[in-house]
Image: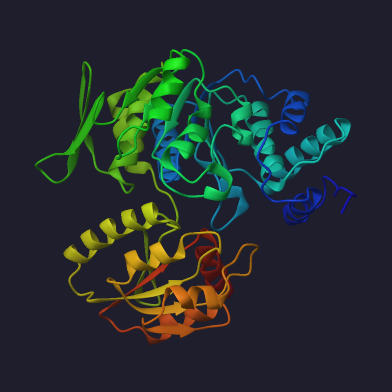
Amino acid sequence: MNTAPLATDSLNTWLDYWSHVHVTGIDLGLERVIPVAEKLGVTRPEAKVLTVAGTNGKGSTTTALASILNAQGYHVGLYQSPHIYRFNERVKLKGIEVSDQALVDAFVAVDDARRSCNLSLSFFEATTLAAFVIFKQQQCDVWVLEVGLGGRLDVVNVIEPDVAVITNIGLDHTDWLGDTIEKIAFEKAGIIRPNIPVIFGGQQELPQAIQDKANACHAQLHAVNRDYFYQYADDGQSWLFASSGTTLKLPLGCLALENISTAVAANLVSGLTVSQQAIAQGIVQAKLQGRFEIRKIAEKTVIFDAGHNPHGVDFLLKQLRKFLEYNKQYTEVVGVFSMLSDKDINSVVNLLKETVLMWKIAPLTVPRAAEIQQLDAALQGLNVQHFDSVKLAFKSALDESKNNQLILVCGSFHTLEAVWEYLEECP
């Protein structure tokens, strides 16, 4: 499709257009993106930029970061990916999703710029640049940016950050980023720039590649459990953050504490004025769909979690065990499950199989979806039911689960999206 939609066309028309402009959905490298970004005038924003990379936890960390800064009164532009329910979730101003028309207008500008440069853009590149166009037009004080894939060659990295945040390093996207922790850490460390503060919030040992890049850039590296610390308070209602010269007692929020603490650390080194009251308020207000999201649907309790690799699912299980400990009426877990074919399905299933009693599986209807045979192979010997679609699998779970059974929807952002579509169709 070479004919661009019009400014009066729908957001969905534009999203379909961008999905066909470039030959591949993922095409790492900045050679094509930089000229278009420069044409749009977005490469040097007159704003403070906080960029977050990592294997897991980026969504929670960017959400908490933006929420705290919004509570302080800054005009914050937040860019995240992927979305779960609506594309507009990817771009927020002051915590509110932007309108369809704002996105369409930005897409018109991006398409004009890429055509004048005679360049092709992938879906992710075009949609990311559109977010930057909106933040520039809205004169945001702060841009909080979540890296999509890796860091060094991701389109988000065309923007020079004032603070670089790396949440953790795990083995994911190995086809693109490398097959060892150090190779992946090298890619994530690509967001580090000279003489800026860097936060490492991963729970594993600090990868040497990150330390090396920080040293080479003379960047001030602050690592969790080395330069800053956090722990639950004795009262069970709060937690403590401590760094050199700073000790804060803060409320617990809905998001994972390790990611909230990373966000607090990043705020404190950003040079932005942020009060303890704003930090506390931002933590309480920070919420993110699809991250251990608990909902009551047709009198059944459903947990949605977008964990799609071993590290993310291990984190999900820690939260699930804590939930079951306090909600003893649930003695069994029914899983509505599907994944992408290039993910580590076997490891994810091995983690979940001791907790999930019944598996209701179906193939996703997106590129890279795992076929039912691939899912079956990983689930061999377990209690499995097959369905033609995730929607039908979820309907079965709702219709058949008993009061002592909890429904867990997991395996991919796309699995959650399919269930949401079903709920939209059948309110």
Location of residue 369 in the rendering, given as x and y in whole percent from the top left corner: 59, 66
Residue at 32% over, 56% down: 314
Location of residue 80 in the rendering, given as x and y in whole percent from the top left corner: 54, 42
- Which residue is more in the foreground, 411 or 379? 379
Please name the colour scheme applied to the rendered image: rainbow
Q: Residue furthest right?
A: 3
- Which residue is more in the foreground, 206 or 276? 206
Q: Residue furthest front?
A: 179
Q: As displayed, is residue 17 above or below residue 404?
A: above
Location of residue 121 in the rendering, given as x and y in whole percent from the top left corner: 76, 41
Asked where in the image residue 246 lies, by quadrant, the reply is: top left
Q: Count every numbered label the image shows and give the total.
A: 0
**Residue 349 visible in this rendered orientation of the protein:** yes
Location of residue 281 in the rendering, given as x and y in whole percent from the top left corner: 32, 35
Residue at 52% over, 27% down: 191
Residue at 56% over, 52% down: 83
User: Which part of the image, by quadrant, shows the N terminus?
Assistant: bottom right
Q: Residue furthest left?
A: 234
**Residue 75 visible in this rendered orientation of the protein:** no
- Which residue is more in the foreground, 297 or 159? 159
- Which residue is more in the foreground, 95 or 31? 31
Tell whether 331 sits left or right of 170: left
Asked where in the image residue 244 lies, by quadrant, the reply is: top left
